[in-house]
Amino acid sequence: MNRQRVTTQLTTEAAKVAATCGMLAGRIEEFVHVFYQAHRQPGTSFWYNTGGARAAADVLCLDANGELEQAVSLENKARPDLNTPYKALGNLQSGGAHTSATNCKLQNGENTKNVYLNSQTNNLQIKWGGGLFTTPNSDRVIASTDWEPNGKAGVTAGIYKECENSIAAFDRTAEAAEAETQLLIKLEGDEAPTLGPKEIAKDEFHKDIPKNKLTITAADLKTVHEKLHRFRKSHNKEEENLRGARLHFLQQQLQLNKTTCELGVKHTSKDYCEVTDTEPPKCDGKEQ
């Protein structure tokens, strides 16, 4: 198991998840904000008819003033479920016609209305939110077919599949790393583990390394475990011998220091005198 390779791969996949899903989420958020800010008459002007006046509280990404909430980082150990909310979009009710009552031209792509361009000659179907909502090319009410998923089975078949796919790729990398870690733990253990074959894909470590898919059999792994066990046992014995030699040397050093200290504190009981001239010393029995 190449730990550096796995760490790099996990980091790369995580960055891809953040970039891909963050970009798509930003498109949706901007779409919601544009349409929310497009009208200023809460009681009579709205682009999607829900039977009542608009309110910022109806949209989770808006604050009480109708402004976009600040982006925050949330820790969630559970895998994000994109498929359920994606498929729920197909259950939105029809309604919200851009008529004289609601008057939201942002969703009208009919060429005679000149909503997006002056002298508009073509019927335009503008995709909002990266394709979350596609404007009709005529003056009609909104239908469920104007929204994703528009009959698609799930998020992996729709316009937001790259987000889901990047999460799935990260999951696969994380699961592979966990499996390899558990294999290493078993190989390094004292007890004989029950191991199955391990496959190494072509180019797993680098281009042409290995050149072809390899299969490490259960017998091979058993042999590796036995060799590691013997090596560790032998290595531990050598380590114990080396540790004993170090302790013996330390004991000798401590004994030598003790002896040196004892010699240092011993001294003669006689005082010393100083001779300052050439006459015979008169120390009265004192050492010179």
Image (cartoon, grey):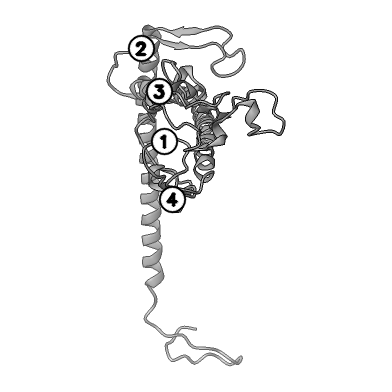
| Mark 1 or mark 2, whichever is nearer to me | 1
Label tally? 4
Q: Is residue 257 above or below residue 226?
A: below
* Residue indicated by mark 1: 49
- Precedes in sequence: disc 4 or disc 3: 4
Pointer 4 local density, CA inside 10 Å: few below 14, some 14–19, many at least 20? some
Question: Distance from label 3 to label 2 (Cα)?
Answer: 54 Å
Label 1 close to label 2 by CB (< 8 Å):
no
Pointer 1 local density, CA inside 10 Å: few below 14, some 14–19, many at least 20? some
Residue visible at 39% across and 66% down? 261
On residue 222, the disc is 2
- Precedes in sequence: disc 1 or disc 4: 1
Label 3 close to label 2 by CB (< 8 Å):
no
- Precedes in sequence: disc 3 or disc 1: 1
Question: Distance from label 4 to label 3 (Cα)?
Answer: 26 Å
Question: Distance from label 1 to label 4 (Cα)?
Answer: 21 Å
Pointer 3 local density, CA inside 10 Å: few below 14, some 14–19, many at least 20? some
Label 2 close to label 4 by CB (< 8 Å):
no
| Mark 3 or mark 1, whichever is nearer to me | 1
- Precedes in sequence: disc 3 or disc 2: 3
> Please, what is the three-letter code of the amino acid marked with disc 2?
Lys
- Precedes in sequence: disc 1 or disc 2: 1
Q: Secondary structure at mark 2?
A: helix
Depth order, front residue of 137/285? 137
Picture coordinates of residue 78, whole percent (x, y): 34, 32
* Residue indicated by mark 4: 63
* Residue indicated by mark 3: 90
Depth order, front residue of 40/262? 40
| Mark 1 or mark 4, whichever is nearer to me | 1
Question: Distance from label 2 to label 4 (Cα)?
Answer: 61 Å
